[in-house]
Image: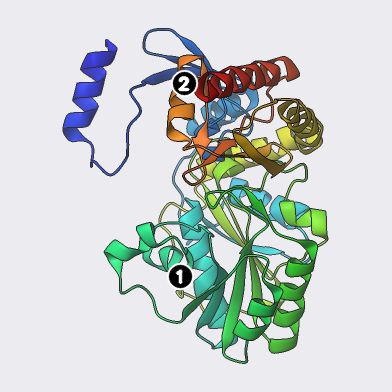
C-alpha cells in the first residue's frame, strides 16, 4: 500500500484523538524502523518507551510464536503455568518486599490498580501526587496527572487528589496527613520534562508514608525495565515502595502492565478488582522472555554505559539553543530555548525519530540495544538541526 493511500485509509476511520506525523512505520529491527517508502530511521521514540529490547528481538519473536501455538487466553479465575512462573520471577526481581502482583494490560491500568489498592489497604481517600507528573488518561490516573490540558475537558475528576510541586519537600510535608492513603511519585518525570527526583524528596516521601500510615506508590511505567541503568529506577535510591506500577517494556512491546504489591497494603478482598486479559499466557510468556533478555544481555548496565556516552556527546554540542541536558541512563531530555516541534520535524527529515516532553524539551528514549555508532548519528543530527535553526 502506498503511503498516501495508507494515510487516507487510517485518517478516514481512526478516532481522531492522536496528532499524526506524516510517516507510516511498517517494519523494525533493533533500534531502526522503516517507513512505507523503505526509508530507514533511528528510533528514539521506541514505542514511547515500550520497545526497550528494540524491534523484532529474536527471543520475543520466538516466545510469541511458541506460546501462541499453545494457549493465548486464560483468565485469572484459573491457574496457569506461564502466569505462575512470571509472578514468581517478578517477586524475585522487584525491589524490597513487593511479592505480589496484579497483572493488567497498560500503565494506566496499573496506576488505577495502585490507587484502588491504596484506598482499600488504608481505608483512606486522599492521594498526594506531583505537579508535572503524568500517570495516564483513565479517570483515576488522569486525576493523579497534573497537566491541565489533559484534565480540563473531563472535570470533575475523581475527588481527593492533591498535587505538590516536584521535589518540594516542605509542600510534601504539608500535604501528607492522617487522611492520606498514598503518595504517588515518578523517579524521573517523562512527559513532564525528564525531571529527576532528588534523593531527599524521595526519602521524605518514604518517611512521611511510614510515619502517617500512608502507602508509597512509585510509577515505574517509563523508567522501569532497564531504562535508567537499573532494572527499576527506584533502585538508584534504595527506595522500597509499597505499590509499584510497571508496564511499557514489560512484555517486549506487547500490551502488558502490573501493579506490584507489598505487605503494608494488606490482604485484598476477592472481586475488589479484575481484568479479562490481565495475566494472559501470551503476555506472560513474553514478559518472562523479556526479563531473561534483560539479564543475559545486561541491558540495564548497557543503558547506564550508553547513557553516559550519549550525555557526554550531547554536552559537546556548542549551541545557544540548549538550556540544559538532563536524564538518567537512556532517558534523556534536552531543554531548549525554542519550541521542540520544528526540531522533531527536522530530525525526522534526517532519519531520527524523537519525542517531545512539554513544549521545549526534546526527549530521547532509544531502545537499550542501540549501538554507540547509532547514538553518535543521533547526536550529529541534533547538532546539525540546532545549528540550522540557530542561524
Quadrant location of residue 228?
Answer: top right
Q: Residue furthest left?
A: 12
Left or right position of 274 against 167: left
The local secondary structure at tag 1 comes to: loop
- How far across and how far down the image is residue 172, in percent? 65, 77
Mark 2: which secondary structure?
helix
Quadrant location, the N terminus: top left
| Disc with the residue nearer the chain's start (2 vs 1) | 1
Please tell me which residue is depicted at 43% across the width and 24% down the height of the picture: 345
Q: Where is residue 258, by image quadrant?
A: bottom right
**Where's residue 174, x and y in %?**
64, 85
365 and 356: which is toward the camera: 356
**Which of label 2 and label 1 is nearer to you?**
2
Residue 346 is labelled as 2
Displayed quadrant of residue 334 = top right
The residue under the point 68% across, 21% down is 375
Residue 273 - label: 1
Whether residue 113 is situated above or below residue 103 in the rendered picture: below
How crowded pointer 1 is (Cα within 10 Å; few <14, some 14-19, many 20+) is rated as few
Amino acid at each position: 500500500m502506498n503511503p498516501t493511500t495508507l494515510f487516507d485509509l487510517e485518517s478516514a476511520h481512526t478516532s481522531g484523538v492522536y496528532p499524526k506525523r506524516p510517516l507510516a512505520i511498517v517494519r523494525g529491527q533493533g533500534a531502526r524502523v522503516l517507513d512505507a517508502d523503505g526509508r530507514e530511521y533511528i528510533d528514539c521514540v521506541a514505542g514511547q518507551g515500550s520497545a526497550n529490547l528494540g524491534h523484532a528481538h529474536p527471543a520475543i519473536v520466538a516466545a510469541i510464536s511458541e506460546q501462541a501455538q499453545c494457549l493465548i487466553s486464560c483468565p485469572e479465575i484459573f491457574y496457569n503455568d506461564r502466569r505462575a512462573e512470571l509472578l514468581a520471577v517478578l517477586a524475585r526481581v522487584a525491589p524490597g518486599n513487593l511479592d505480589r502482583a496484579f497483572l493488567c494490560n497498560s500503565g494506566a491500568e496499573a496506576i488505577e490498580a495502585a490507587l484502588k489498592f491504596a484506598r482499600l489497604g488504608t481505608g483512606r481517600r486522599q492521594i498526594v501526587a506531583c505537579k508535572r507528573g503524568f500517570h495516564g488518561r483513565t479517570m483515576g490516573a488522569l486525576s493523579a496527572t497534573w497537566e491541565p490540558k489533559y484534565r480540563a475537558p473531563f472535570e470533575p475528576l475523581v475527588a481527593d487528589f492533591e498535587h505538590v510541586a516536584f521535589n518540594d519537600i516542605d509542600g510534601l510535608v504539608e500535604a501528607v496527613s492522617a487522611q492520606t492513603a498514598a503518595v504517588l511519585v515518578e523517579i524521573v518525570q517523562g512527559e513532564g520534562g525528564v525531571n529527576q527526583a532528588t534523593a531527599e524528596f524521595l526519602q521524605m516521601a518514604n518517611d512521611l508514608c511510614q510515619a502517617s500510615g500512608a502507602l508509597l506508590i512509585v510509577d515505574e511505567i517509563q523508567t522501569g525495565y532497564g531504562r535508567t541503568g537499573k532494572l527499576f529506577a527506584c533502585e538508584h535510591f534504595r527506595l522500597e515502595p509499597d505499590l509499584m506500577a510497571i508496564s511499557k517494556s514489560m512484555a517486549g512491546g506487547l500490551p502488558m502492565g502490573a501493579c506490584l504489591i507489598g505487605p503494608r497494603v494488606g490482604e485484598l478482598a476477592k472481586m475488589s478488582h479484575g481484568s479479562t486479559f490481565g495475566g494472559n499466557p501470551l503476555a506472560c510468556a513474553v514478559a518472562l522472555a523479556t526479563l531473561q533478555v534483560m539479564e543475559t544481555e545486561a541491558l540495564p548496565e548497557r543503558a547506564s554505559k550508553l547513557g553516559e556516552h550519549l550525555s557526554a556527546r550531547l554536552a559537546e554540542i556548542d549551541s545557544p539553543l540548549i538550556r540544559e541536558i538532563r536524564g538518567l541512563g537512556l532517558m534523556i531530555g534536552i531543554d531548549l530555548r525554542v519550541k521542540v516541534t520544528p526540531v522533531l520535524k527536522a530530525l525526522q527529515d534526517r532519519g531520527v525519530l524523537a519525542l517531545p516532553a512539554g513544549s521545549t524539551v526534546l526527549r530521547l528514549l532509544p531502545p537499550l540495544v542501540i549501538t554507540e555508532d547509532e547514538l553518535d548519528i543521533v547526536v550529529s543530527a541534533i547538532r546539525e538541526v540546532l545549528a540550522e535553526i540557530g542561524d
